Amino acid sequence: MLMLACRCLILQAAPVSTSVVVDFDDLPENQPVPTHYGGITWDIGYHGLGDHDGYAYVISSENGGRAKSQPNCMMNEWGVRYLNIIFDTPVIFLGAFFTRHGTVESRWPQFVGFVAFMDENDKYGRPAGALALSSSKPAWLACSYPGSVVKIQIQSTETTYGLGGWYDMDDLSYMPVPEAGAFTYLFTGLASFALLVKRRL
């Protein structure tokens, strides 16, 4: 009976967080990703070809995109080197699939990486994983930062033109962080259970 009561406390504390997968498939192609989409503010990208600033841009597999899940994916317009994505609330960022875009080898990025920002006062962030893009097939880049983040900067490197190179990204994934109150409720329940067990012993 006591074990059943404890199990009920755990189940009521908070629903299990499930990952959110941003796949761009519900968006019209050939235009920027909406400023607010998928629980994310999609910021302007910086330092692309000719020092142009660009956007996260929706492209379909029929128009040259290499999507992990059909039909759409995201391309970094102008080959921007830095693209910021800002979450509505703190999240556990899991990662995304990346691949080279297009057929011009000299414009492919050599590396794609993440920089994680822990809170609004974090000015510099922390490196959180990198991937060498050596194939035209989508490859998963996992975020190596273990805590919650409010912003991720996607960085890419391509040396020929001194820019980031063109990549496609798809199925970006993250998990919402449960509210603090849910954890408080859970641990209070577990502490009460432990006290009851101790008294019975």
Image: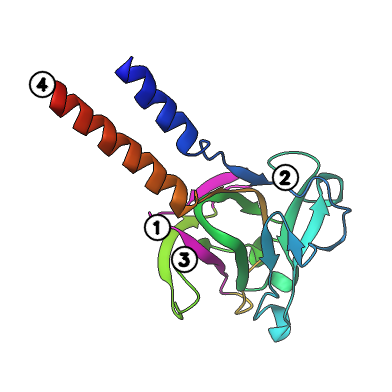
On screen, 101 above or below 18? below
Instruction: Measure the alpha-carbon separation of dots 2 and 3.
Output: 24 Å
Q: Position of residue 7 (x, y in %)?
A: 39, 24
Q: Which of marks 3 and 4 is in front?
A: 4
The range drawn in magenta is 134-159
Query: SS at mark 4?
Result: loop
Residue corresponding to mark 4? 201
Residue corresponding to mark 3? 116
On screen, 5 above or below 89? above
First in sequence: mark 4 or mark 1?
1
Instruction: Measure the alpha-carbon separation of dots 3 and 4.
Output: 47 Å
| 80 is within the stretch colored magenta | no
Query: SS at mark 3?
Result: strand
Q: Where is residue 189 in the image (x, y as percent from the top left)?
A: 34, 36
Q: In this view, does 157 lie to the left or right of 201?
A: right
The quadrant in which the C terminus is found is: top left
| Residue 67: mark in rendering | 2
Q: Do the residues labelled 2 and 3 touch (CB within 8 Å)?
A: no
Residue corresponding to mark 1? 145
Instruction: Measure the alpha-carbon separation of dots 1 and 3.
Output: 7 Å
Taking the spot 35% from the left edge, 26% from the top edge, the residue there is 6
Q: Position of residue 36 (x, y in %)?
A: 75, 64
Query: SS at mark 2?
Result: loop
Instruction: Measure the alpha-carbon separation of dots 4 and 1.
Output: 42 Å
